[in-house]
Amino acid sequence: MASDLVTRDRFAGEDALLARTAGAGKEPTFRMASRVAAVVVTFNRREIVLECLSSLFSGTRRPDEVIVVDNGSSDGTSDAIRARYPKVRLLSIGENLGPAGGFNRGMRAALQLDCDWIMVLGDDVFLEADTLRSLLQVAASADGTVAMVAPVVPGNPPRIWRHWAISLPVVPSHPGQSVPPIEVDMVVYNAPLIRADVVRQLGGPREDYVVTWWEWEYGLRLRQRGYRILILPDARVRHLALGSAALGPSSRVLAPWYGYYLARNHLRLILERRSVIDGLFWAFHQTKWLATLPERDHRGARVWFRLLGAIDALRGRMGRTVVPQLTTKGW
């Protein structure tokens, strides 16, 4: 593993090089009175983000601060938020930086608000009434090695991510029976709490990933430094899964351009970790994908984007190098 990697972030037009710290030490536990700043990233989903904000403000424990990162919306999202939620801090970005860039900017802004924990979520994630309270109860009793505490998205059954995109079922909780937290390698940004001190030390998501695999990189970065990530099965959120990788509102087929970032970011992460086993996993994953190619449309474009992504990963060419051809709202 590359233990001396650094994260290069951009915030407010300035470059900031955030060096990784030597390790995670034991620290005092947090109180239920901990301050929480919620960071919501949105793009052209005016009504959806308003519903997301409603869920944040309707809980039995509300965030102390809410920041909405508007990733260059053109549908009046910012104006609607100002009108309905004037106390929300709006961070308007003039361009779409993707989720990685949006969360990077929002988390950096949250650090200026003297918060203990940062909750991060996309605009299509909705909290249940007790979600934040349940997460904070676990955070309050956690030691300083716990960097993230996350809810689950109910499924059939609910699932968690572990070990390079392998998902495992979560034992459902029953009335009167609580399921203890489960330690995992990464979580998607469906309203996890991230300890603010960790963000100060290690930075936020890598903006140069733009979209996909950035949550994996961040989770592995935390794990490398000895931090732990917990899933709390008793805390639930609802996720509409409206990411713009789909070709249409109800389609689960990834658009051809998305394959570029899938191949590039995954391979680049493996190269930086210097892991032969992970490299073999990447090759197996691409071979498996090729086997499904006859069932897909735009086959030539899909192969080209994947190949270009692999080449750019080897060259170290990161950032928003391929402009997404968005056919749905959002990322």
Image: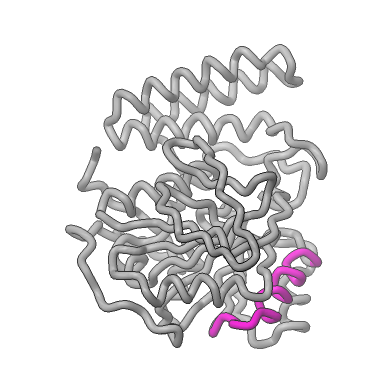
**Residue closest to the eye, 268 or 239:** 239
Q: Residue furthest front?
A: 176
Residue at image location 59% in from the left, 82% down from the top:
61
Residue at image location 73% in from the left, 76% down from the top:
54
Q: Where is 124 relative to 111, above or below?
A: above
Magenta-colored span: 47-64
Left or right of 40 on screen, residue 81: right
Residue at image location 60% in from the left, 82% down from the top:
62
Q: How is the image coloured?
A: one colour
Q: Is residue 71 visible?
A: no
x, y (%) of residue 325? 70, 39
Left or right of 143 on screen, residue 181: right
**Residue closest to the eye, 146 or 1:** 146
Q: Where is 130 relative to 126, above or below?
A: below
Residue at image location 30% in from the left, 57% down from the top:
227
Q: Is residue 206 visible?
A: yes
